[in-house]
Amino acid sequence: RVKDMGRNGFGFYDSSMNSNVQRNLMLNMRLHQAIQQGDIEIYYQPILDLQSRKIVAAEALMRWFDPELGFISPEDFIPLAEKNGLIHKLGDMVLLEACTQAASWQSISPITVAVNFSSVQFRYCEQLQETIVDVLLKTGLPANQLDMEVTESLLIDQGHSLMKMLAYLKQLGVGLSIDDFGTGYSALSYLQKFPFSKLKIDRAFINKMATSSSDESLVSAILAMAKSLGLKVVAEGIETEQQARFLQQHNCEFGQGYLFSKPIPAKEFMALLQRERDRKRLLLTS
Ligand code: C2E
Ligand code: MG
Ligand code: MG
Ligand code: MG
């Protein structure tokens, strides 16, 4: 191996590229099976009001545990599913499951569910719109308890039908969040053009706040800008009390992160909501 590399610097890269291709081929095959066998689960990560520290929402996140390969990150399999078209099936699955769960939370507390959408799912706008309306009707979840999370890549090549769809969903009350804010490359003018209701600051910025004062300035600038555009802000990836306090002091409305909770199975999330409600009742009666 080392000798190969000495002769042409490509030997090493070739073999690692090869095994990458092989792994992706295998994951592709397994993903088909996983969907059929129901091996893909949805976890929920609480989103808190940073002032009251109460749960106000949950983000639905896909979890794939393969019996042999173990945990496979959505960062690995979502891009594959976008290429092989399975993202449509996966996307419909997550939406239905998340809205069904969220409808059952409403009797405890008016919790919003945030569902991630891939830009690829918007290639068939009319169909997606129909699916969303169907799911809301079928599950009985109020439209304003659903937030759609999209990334900047959706905003490239946007056509008339996308704008029409987003306007329609907004009118129904469905929320639209810009996810991973700060990691893309588009001009900021899209923030005015699209009917966003929330902006999610990427966790890379939150993470570096403690060690970099320029990241702190960046975060407070984003918060000021969001405020002037009328957008609510969710900070992602809050891991320390210090980060939470900084964000709270700069009027960031919402936060999620390991400090509060990792993504957890639906059952555990339900139990968490019940505990929160019981605690409130206890406080009221004592
Ligand atoms: P995202 O939408 O930005 O989701 C937030 C990610 O940050 C999640 O990673 C979550 O587990 C992680 N996170 C939250 N708090 C913390 C923290 O305090 N520390 C650290 N280190 N991480 C934190 P996850 O679940 O691995 O998902 C990664 C990405 O995969 C998501 O990023 C999203 O882009 C995509 N994804 C996951 N589920 C779905 C889905 O159902 N549909 C689509 N289209 N994409 C999905
Ligand atoms: Mg998200
Ligand atoms: Mg994000
Ligand atoms: Mg992300």
Image (cartoon, helix red, strand yellow):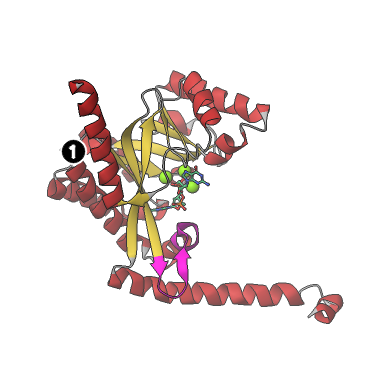
Q: In this view, does 158 lie above or below 211?
A: below
Q: Magenta segment, which residues? A: 65-78
Whether 73 is among the magenta residues is: yes
* x 50%, y 40%: residue: 237
Indicate the quadrant where residue 213 lies.
Answer: top right
* x 58%, y 36%: residue: 205
Whether 74 is among the magenta residues is: yes
Q: Where is residue 126 in the image (x, y as percent from the top left)?
A: 26, 50
Indicate the quadrant where residue 255 lies.
Answer: top left
Q: Is residue 184 above or below residue 34?
A: above
Q: Position of residue 185 (x, y in %)?
A: 57, 41
Q: Where is residue 250 in the image (x, y as percent from the top left)?
A: 50, 20
Q: Where is residue 269 in the image (x, y as percent from the top left)?
A: 30, 46
Along the horizontal axis of the image, is 108 left or right of 64?
left
Along the horizontal axis of the image, is 81 left or right of 39?
right
- Location of the N terminus by quadrant is bottom right
Instruction: Tell me if I can see residue 250 in this picture.
Output: no
Instruction: Tell me if I can see residue 240 in this picture.
Output: yes
User: Is 126 or 221 nearer to us in this picture?
Assistant: 221
Could you classify mark 1 by the number of other residues whose Cα lies within 10 Å: few (under 14), some (14-19), or many (20 or more)? some
- Name the residue beneath numbered marker 1: 106
User: Is 156 or 175 nearer to us in this picture?
Assistant: 175
